[in-house]
Image (cartoon, rainbow, N blue to C red):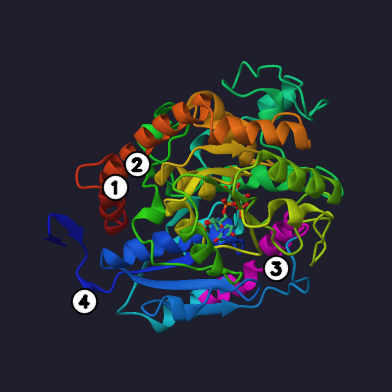
Amino acid sequence: MTREGGERQVHEEKGRRIVFFPCPLQGHMNPMLQLATLLHSKGFSITIIHTQFNSPNPSNFPNFSFEPISDGIQETSTKDFMALLIALNIRCEAPFRDCLARILSENKRDSIVCIISDAIMHFTQAVANHLKLPRIVLRPSPPSCFIAFANFPLLRQKGYLPIKDPQSKVPVSELPPLRVKDIPTIDTKNSSEEFDQLIPHMISETLASSGLILNSLDYLERTSLTQIQQDFSIPTFPVGPLHKYSPGSSNSLLTQDPSCIAWLDNQVHGSVIYVSFGSLADMEKQELVETAWGLANSDQPFLWVIRPGSVGGLDCVELPEGFEEKTRGRGCVVKWAPQQEVLAHPAVGGFWTHCGWNSTLESICEGVPMLCWPSFGDQRVNARYLSHVWRVGLELENGLERGEIERAIRRLMVEKEGEEMRKRVKVLKENAESSIRKGGSSQESLERLVDYILSF
Ligand code: UDX
């Protein structure tokens, strides 16, 4: 081990190799590849074992080795992603084990020091045990959500689960500041059984692993991080925000439309509301109509991402008649945007988001306040923290209705309330920036992580 520029660095020639196994969904893949890039910069060799479904693009990561495994997934969409995750956990086990065993037998000099896999790919723990390799888990959503998931048996026992009224604002006294509507459940297409099957495995196999890496930071989530350390005896490494270490390590599964940046260049500073609901959330056709008229009537410039398949499962959607005429010159609609670049653009003054954890962190790191419309899972917890704890977001609590949307956009973009949120989010941004600088909490966690991996 050497120190370069005051930072820990592994000797390249030792050839310590880490094998990563990402979950093939955009919001999971991004932080995993960002972490791989970061650990590569610390001198580790990197192998990415990945599914053929949603496979990463090797040419974006010329220094990594890529090993595809067969996953038997026929369906090419993520419409029923819970069923997809369950299928992946079953079908990938044998190919993953065989691939890993082969790499181990081929790389005597270049020994594998550990596996880092996504928490939701829980089968990797059994494979790691079988091959006597340590496994460290990356959980791409926040510690507060991990705690909520781990407490599902208690919530069931106390009668909160299954949720009877999804709009209930009754506080969950066992998990402050959450209310019943903030409990991170996922309504699957068929039943909640799939979810009930996946989450307990995700928690138990994470707790059976050698460590937990979180894409979060002490300043944002000290209470939850302390609680994880107290309640679960597992080494924990909050190293986020990961995307700030390696902004170049892009792995967009959809083609990003750069034309929106040129459009933003012509807009007034801080005037544009950016609207995007991530890679999985969807809406009904009528909700699209309400969204469109809410944006149109707000009189604010907007950049709106309508991902193919995100409205009623349709590849192509029609916006309501008269919408284009009413918004001509102040609206830009794209299928997929270079989101980090968009949020960093000076014209953007607010982000209407589904509160996916990557989107949440990306917005905080650019000092952009949010309009929150959570859809499922951790997004509900994130929206609660954004609006109630950090107070940098405004939650649309009563579904999508044009009048409410219009008022909420104005409150965020032009009223004093939005200005106050903008000031608070700037403080979070500064703290996020200092956390990854030398001596910062995330930087120190990262150094602990490197030492920990080297101790195996
Ligand atoms: C999912 C879950 O929904 C989320 O809550 C969880 O924390 C991670 O997995 P997703 O819904 O896709 O992710 O949301 P999010 O976490 O925000 O990730 C989306 C990623 O896609 C972000 O990194 C964002 O920058 C990127 N993106 C989004 C684009 O590059 N272009 C877009 O137009 C929209």
Identify the mark at residue 432; answer none if there is no mark: 2
Q: Is residue 74 magenta?
A: no
Which of 316/356 is in front? Answer: 316
Part of the protein shown in magenta: 79-99
**CA separation in Å, label 2 and label 4:** 33 Å
Quadrant where the N terminus sits is bottom left
Q: Which residue is mark 3?
A: 91
Q: CA distance from mark 1 to mark 4?
A: 27 Å
Amino acid of disc 4: Glu
Query: Which residue corresponds to mark 1?
Result: 436
- Judge depth for marks 2 and 4 and give the one in front: 2
Amino acid bearing label 2: Ala
85 in magenta: yes
Crowding at dot 3, Cα within 10 Å, few <14 / some 14-19 / many 20+, comes out as some
* 409 versus 113 height, above or below: above
Image location (x, y in percent) of residue 305:
64, 57
Q: Is residue 357 above or below residue 410?
A: below
**Cα–Cα gap, marks 2 and 3:** 38 Å
Inspect the image, locate mark 3, and give the three-letter code of the amino acid beneath it: Arg
Which mark, by number, is residue 255? none
Res 21 seen here: no
Q: Are marks 1 and 4 in contact (CB under 8 Å)?
A: no
**Quadrant of the frame with the C terminus:** bottom left
According to the picture, the residue beneath numbered tag 4 turns out to be 13
Dot 4 beta carbon under 8 Å from ligand 1: no
